[in-house]
Image: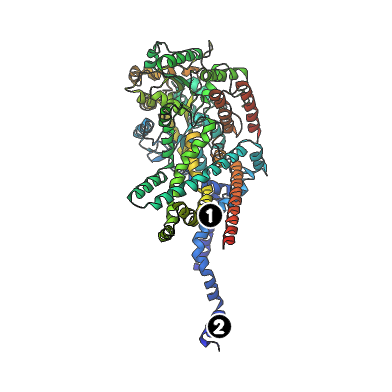
Amino acid sequence: MIVKRRSVKRRSVERRNVDRVAGRRRWSPAAAVALITAAALAACGSSSGSAATAPAAGSDQKISVSFLSYNYGTPDIGGKGTQALIDAFEKAHPNITVKPQGVAVADVLTRLQTDTAAGSPPDVAQIGWSKMAAAYQLLPIVPVQDIPTRADWNAAMAGFSQHLLSAVEVDGKVKAVPYTISIPVIFYNADLFRKAGLDPTRPPTTVDEVKKDALAIKEKAGAQGVYFAVVDSGKSDYLTQSVIASNGGREVGPDGLPAFDQPAAVGALAAMQDLTTSGAQPAITATNAVAAFGAGKLGMLIGSTAVTASLQKASTGKFELRTAGFPSFGSRPAAPTYSGAGLAVLAKDKAHQQAAWEFIKFLTSAEGFTIITSKIGYLPLRPSLATDPKYLAPYFAANKLLSPALAQLDDVSPYQSYTGKRASQAVVALQDDAVEPIVLRGANPASTLSSVAGQVRGVLGQK
Amino acid sequence: MANPSLIAGERGVDHAPPVVRLRDRARPWLYLAPLIVALVVWVYGPLVFTGVLSFMSWNLTAPHPSWLGTANYSRLVHEPQFPHAARNTLVYAVVMLPFATVVPMALAIALWKRPGRVSTVYRTLLFLPVVLAPIATAITWQFLLDPLSGLVNVVAGWFGVGAHNWLGDPSSALYSVLLITSVKVVALNVLLFGAALANLERGLLEAAALDGATEWEITRHIVLPHLRRTVVLLGMLSLVVVWPWIFANVAVLTQGGPAGSTDNVYYRLFTYAFTFFDAGTASAAAVVITGALALVLGLGLLVAGRRRRAIA
């Protein structure tokens, strides 16, 4: 009798266990495919596991935070700087362990998609701004501003560029905190300027001056003049948005639909085309242009400050590298769009979300940006640090390359995203079918932009 | 009179207990089971899921795909990108064919006819590109083909040829990618033709030479017929195995551009799935590609089978 009762009890426990497992693993076929894809393509990267029973940060118990970063694990300064940030954070927060995961910059969204589908997204992810709108739509991102108390948030963000925080707000709140931010600037070879009879202390400030100086370099210094990297190798449109905004237009309208067929946008891209047709700019890819600039064969490169460190390394012992602010169109103020990445939280439970916030708070603190700027070369998004002797004043005294970009931090225009789930396709269509043919191959700006705008509207309207 | 032991044995088989008969029938299937399970899990299962997904809209993370019917297929047909990529794929396949057959065959025959240390060194050097990592190879080519300072333009300049943007000009990008990929294809197929030639009895050639056959006649009537099946096999394989190499070169060097000139159905499929996160359209593209490939290979096998029967 006792044996029978035990047997019934065991069966009941087993059934509950089976039900629990079944409840947890009620996978659709699509989820199964995602899991297979995740296994095949994501190289089995897993998060620290956001178990619901994780201890709260701040207690004596240890907690781990997984961090997906495209800077982590690279052999260059980006990898070393990220490791320095993690080490400093772990020293300051001995109860929180960071488990970093590297990923190729082009694969961030893919990796996050597959990890999420497999049920193990990282707790914190470094996501590029051009992919952020898609990430908000596709991934279970917890708005960072919702995690801390209002007082904690305000204290942590005091001194942070308020203009930038407002620019990245979505529906009135900061969903991802700006982290490694770049602004396009003019990199120029001071030696080629001198060779062309130009004054390197007076770099061009407008697009017309850029063209004039580039032609002078081509004629007198025997090098290529300028490369305005609107035809981005990664098919990002942040420079396209920068030139259109600087010419008083918009790439994306307030309704999330294309506005790049309007006169201001057409004029901006016509000016880019004029650089090529006049001979001031070679018709090459951005990758080739960066290589040419590093080799001292290109006078000016207009691109993101993200390449500052690599250009500095390439120019050492070869030529004098300088930077200037993003050029304007005539008397209109320049309005460059930021690029780079923000930090988003995907942690599932409160304990990991709180630990993720502590990590983000540190990365974007004065100490964090001191490491980010001095070791990786990204802008300090707390501008006062540049003059603070405790933090970055010595760095900026010795290194002037980031100063023009820092001066333009309050002029940046927000990155605009297309509406709907086909936003990425819209960006690729604009870059591939309009910007590249117009700028590098002489396509008619007005008719090409009009035709591609129609095409993009059709794409965005699809189910 | 029949052999009694044999009859007894036959009766023994016929009247074995059902459990034994079942066990005997099941045994080969049990041996095959691991392979069958692996095929179902990793090949046919995903194939069926892909077929189902091709009728749905899904961004890879939404909990439930939504039913779309044939809209994904309609999109493939009506948007210009996929038909354009399909036409490019045809060009890739046709241009790659001689690099998969004629060129490596000629090199393999030349090396086989002159055995020795020099031939071995040549064979090793020819095979080297196969073992190099595809991405590393592509990046090396990126440097070589740099329009401003690449070695290819420097060398072309010595012969009075002006600098050309090989990968940035739509008229030359596709053929540049094809040539870069063909180096690997030729390298691999020289080895495979060499393996096929190893089975050819050299005595046959010596006998033909004694009978007064010229070098060309020996090649034409003895060596080439021996390699016929290898040519068909490698021709068909080139339709299947070269795409990962082409994909790596396109992904690193051109990303399908300029103006879609280097795009192909495989890179487009990847773009749908992992740039646009449109698993439905990507699955529809995968179904179309699989169907087209099955059709081409099926026809190839049919023609080869008929020819073999005709020869027999």
First in sequence: mark 2 vs mark 1: 2
The quadrant in which the N terminus of chain B is found is bottom right
Crowd tier of the residue under label 2, counting other residues whose Cα lies within 10 Å: few below 14, some 14–19, many 20 or above:
few
Where does the image place residue A149, in percent across and percent down from the top left?
48, 29
The quadrant in which the C terminus of chain B is found is bottom right
> Outermost residue, front direction?
B212
> Callout 2: helix, strand or loop?
helix
Q: Nearer the viewer, residue A367 or B182?
A: B182
Give the amino acid type for the residue marked by disc 1 in the picture.
Val
Where does the image place residue B215, in percent across and percent down from the top left?
44, 52
Give the amino acid type for the residue marked by disc 2 in the picture.
Arg
Subunit under mark 1: B
Subunit under mark 2: B
Where does the image place residue B225, in percent across and percent down from the top left?
50, 56
| Disc nearest the viewer among 2 and 1 | 2
Is A56 left, or right, of A460 in this rendering? left
> Callout 1: helix, strand or loop?
helix
Crowd tier of the residue under label 1, counting other residues whose Cα lies within 10 Å: few below 14, some 14–19, many 20 or above:
few
Where does the image place residue B195, in percent across and percent down from the top left?
43, 55
Can you tell which mark lies on residue B11? 2
- Residue identifier under label 1: B41
Q: Residue at x 39, y 31 (%)?
A: A78
Instruction: Say whether marks 2 and 1 touch (CB < 8 Å).
Output: no
Quarter of the image where one finds residue A140: top right
Quarter of the image where one finds residue B132: top left
Is A113 left, or right, of B122 in this rendering? right
